[in-house]
């Protein structure tokens, strides 16, 4: 039988943060179907039941540090964990939209974007990284974006989203340096999922070529392949869905 994650071994224990989003839910479906995976803890604000007895649902508030800490404490006795994927993101909605020019910038948009795209993942990593397996390869991955690359920014716009994802990339890099000093088997990476047919991207799909608009299932499959391929030397980097390293 073909393994989903050949480099990761068996009896895997996984955390998916943002499990009710399009990509988060696709991760759960593919991992639940794998014989390598023993248990999946699906974390989200609203929670959602799943037919597989491998999947346990926990609710927590991504914007509340005490709630994140409580979720980590609830998981402490069930670990250690081999994979933690933070599959959250905010591009538009809640009264904000990507800015076409600087006149559209607002403090509200920056605050909301940084809360979901940067602060939440950073504090989640603070509490969840200590739960990761230290005896073998373990991966903490957060969904980032190519538009968060400073060197790749050629058309401008999207100030709050770009800045919040660039800040997330710095968090990932900095965490990798700290953890790399003691826990060489822990890999911390950002993942660019491509343009995925989810609520986040729907208003911006008009100019996307058909072969570049991915289903959540396809993107999740590709990102799991990236997680399988990365090693300790890759920690602190951002990888696209096709395995290409994206420069910061």
Image (cartoon, grey):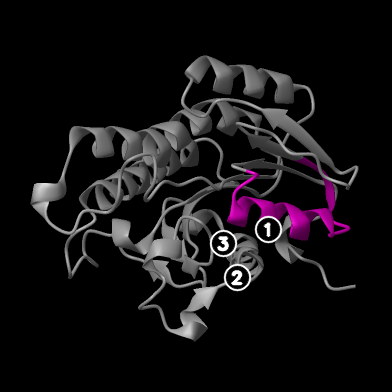
Question: Which residues, given as a range, are shown in magenta?
Answer: 19-40
- The image quadrant that residue 222 belongs to is bottom right
**Callout in the foreground (1, 3):** 1
Residue 240 drawn at (x, y percent)? 46, 67
Instruction: Kindly identify which residue carries mark 2.
Output: 215
SS state under label 3: loop
Quarter of the figure with the C terminus: bottom left
Judging depth in this view, the residue of 232 and 164 nearest the camera is 164
Circle nearer the N terminus (1, 2) = 1
Judging depth in this view, the residue of 80 and 122 nearest the camera is 122
Circle nearer the N terminus (2, 3) = 2
Residue 22 shown in magenta: yes
**Callout in the foreground (2, 3):** 2
Can residue 103 be seen? yes
Residue 77 in the image: above or below residue 128: above
Q: Are marks 1 and 2 in contact (CB under 8 Å)?
A: yes
Left or right of 69 in this view: 38: right
Instruction: Kindly identify which residue carries mark 3.
Output: 230
Instruction: Kindly identify which residue carries mark 1.
Output: 26
- The image quadrant that residue 146 belongs to is bottom left
């Amino acid at each position: 039988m073909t393994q989903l994650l050949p480099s990761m071994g068996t009896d895997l224990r996984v955390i998916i943060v943002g499990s009710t989003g399009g990509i988060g839910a696709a991760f759960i479906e593919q991992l639940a179907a794998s014989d390598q995976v023993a248990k999946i803890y699906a974390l989200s604000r609203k929670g959602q039941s799943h037919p597989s007895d491998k999947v346990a649902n926990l609710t927590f508030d991504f914007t509340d540090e005490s709630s994140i800490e409580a979720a980590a404490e609830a998981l402490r006795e069930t670990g250690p964990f081999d994979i933690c994927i933070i599959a959250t993101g905010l591009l538009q909605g809640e009264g904000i939209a990507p800015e076409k020019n600087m006149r559209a910038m607002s403090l509200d948009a920056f605050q909301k974007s940084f809360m979901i795209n940067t602060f939440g993942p950073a504090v989640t990593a603070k509490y969840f990284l200590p739960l990761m397996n230290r005896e073998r390869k373990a991966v903490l991955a957060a969904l980032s974006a190519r538009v968060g690359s400073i060197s790749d920014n050629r058309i401008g716009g999207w100030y709050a989203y770009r800045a919040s994802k660039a800040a997330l990339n710095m968090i990932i890099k900095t965490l990798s340096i700290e953890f790399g000093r003691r826990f060489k088997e822990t890999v911390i990476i950002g993942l660019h999922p491509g343009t995925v047919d989810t609520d986040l991207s729907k208003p911006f799909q008009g100019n996307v070529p058909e072969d570049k608009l991915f289903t959540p299932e396809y993107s999740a499959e590709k990102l799991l392949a990236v997680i399988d391929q990365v090693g300790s030397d890759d920690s602190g980097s951002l990888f696209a869905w096709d395995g290409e390293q994206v420069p910061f």
